[in-house]
Image: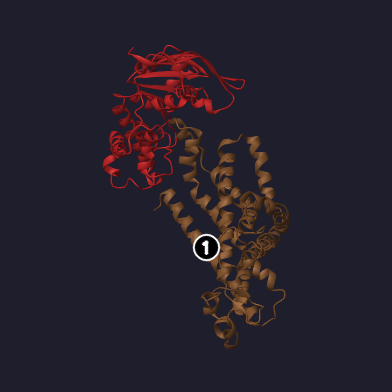
Chain colours: A brown, B red
Amino acid sequence: MNRPKTMTRSRFAEGAVEWLIRASAFSAIVGLFLIFIFIGKEALPILTSPDVRKEANISKLFLPQDQAHPYSWQPVSEIPKYSILPLFVGTLKMTLVAVLFAIPLALGAALFTSEFSPGWLKEFIKPIIELLAGIPSVVLGFFALMVMASYVQELFGIVYRLNAINAGIALGLAVIPIVYTVADDALTSVPKSYREASMAMGASPWQTAWRVVFPAALPGILAACVLGFGRAIGETMIVLMASGNAAIMSWNLAKPARSLSATIAAELGEVVVGSAHYHVLFFIGISLFIFTFVLNMFAHWFVARLQKKVLGTI
Amino acid sequence: MSISSLEARELNLYYGNFHALKNVTVRIAEHAITSIIGPSGCGKSTLLRVFNRMNDLIATVRVTGQVLMHGRDIYSRQLDTASLRKRVGMVFQRPNPFPLSIFENVAYGPKIHALVEKHELAELVANSLKKTGLWEQLKDKLNDSALSLPPEQQQRLCISRLLATEPEVLLMDEPCSALDPIATAKIEELMLELKDKYTIVIVTHNMQQAARISDFTAFMLLGELLEFDSTSAIFTNPQHPKTQDYVTGRFG
């Protein structure tokens, strides 16, 4: 007669565990939602509060102001200037350098380890690249600031020691392992039968990799690139240390740059709570949030579409 | 026996220490269907893969003896596998079209071997699809993914893909085992049409299939070629008792 009792007990345990894992699944969503609400609430006065709007409003943030200095980020000068366009430009140009540097390297490495390297070599390379992801970004930033900057300056013959190229490359080091890992998984999971079919038609290993395996893995590879892009755009410590942090409105990669994320990190600690500057920083935060969110949504939609196309359900 | 363009002489093949093919000598008749039958693990797929050197992809393989195509040893150093595989195409057990469009699948061979100019490609693709009877059904959806087709059409597409490079020999490794009986009948019909122009070697588990479509049949057991003769002789008057046991279904 013990049976029904243990049954109910195990059923109870089952239910508890299920509830627990369900709660943990939703906790991330709740967290995301709360972060959005909080940041949004602090950013809102830019649109609603008359006092704040006198100092900083949407047109001051995005439109050119006076003739001599149309776009300036000088939040602590006598007449504060809050043009955030230089910060957008800074973020984008460093992200661009990072992505252009990291994605070809990461995809090349992934193609090599998934298609060409013998097994033992892959077992050697893959963990080392993934180890790169484990380096704290402050260490990467320190390295870029103290060591890499001098070499980059000399190599490209740049006037400024800290500049967008230097920060972008350092950022790229943080992006490589992410793109590599996801892309390698995508390539490795392409069925062997495709490779066999291609080789049996007389294709070389390179033709097989490039014309069959790569297109078959394209959805996963694009997802890898988007993840890398997202990491680059939000990364803070590296750009804070290695970019020179000058908020200048210039697409010139050889000049210093200041990113959105580094601005928040550098200034939020010292800002007067409730001031216009404070609310602008939160506005920057919510902009970054929305930007990456939209990017991810779009990428998700695009990858799903591509996957359907590859698998033939469209 | 008719003319032969492909033959193996005293062929031995080892996977590491495992002796997979033992002293196999066989002459494949031109423009005919030759089937290789035998129980699982007897080496029939291995023998098939000798003819396009697909076994080379396995690192531990060692081959001795000769495999001749038009009198030239295909295992000689002068011969490159790309041109061999262009002449000796292979169809696999599971249809394996590339995850590309129907057009790109058929255009794959001509592209990698740089066979035609770009403006001739469309015509070549059309002709290759016509040879397998797919053109009428697919001509309006050449840009669709090949994976959206039903299995039988996928297998036909794989055959079209081979025909686009104008091979001489088609090797088929149980090409119907993933298909239902109706699709199987259609593929068999196609094979009978194709044998006028191509030399076909098929590995099959299905003895009725071998009896239905092939002109010659080889029976293999434990890496040896026990008997090789016309299909009617193998099925009605086998010389070897093991062949008799196998074709009558006493083991297998």
**Does the rendering let one see residue A193?**
no
Would residue A26 be found to the left or right of residue B195 on screen? right
Q: Quadrant of the N terminus of chain A?
A: bottom right
Q: Secondary structure at mark 1?
A: helix
x and y percentages locating residue B225 in the rendered image? 47, 16
A178 lies above or below B83: below
x and y percentages locating residue A222 in the rendered image? 51, 52
Chain for disc number 1: A
Question: At 26% across and 42% down in the image, what residue appears?
Answer: B136
Amino acid at dot 1: Leu
Q: Kindly give the residue lying farthest to the left in the view shown.
A: B136
x and y percentages locating residue A169 in the rendered image? 62, 53
Q: Residue A82 falls in which quadrant of the image?
A: bottom right
x and y percentages locating residue A153 in the rendered image? 65, 53
A44 lies above or below A32: below
Between residues A9 and A69, which one lies in front from this camera angle? A69
**Does the rendering let one see residue B175?**
yes
Between residues A243 and B138, which one lies in front from this camera angle? A243
The image shows a total of numbered marks equal to: 1
Q: Kindly give the residue lying farthest to the bottom in the view shown.
A: A50
Between residues B223 and B3, which one lies in front from this camera angle? B3
Label 1 CA crowd tier, 10 Å (few <14, some 14–19, many 20+): some
Would residue B96 be found to the left or right of residue A123 on screen? left
B215 lies above or below B98: above
Would residue B45 be found to the left or right of residue A116 on screen? left
Kindly identify which residue carries mark 1.
Answer: A295
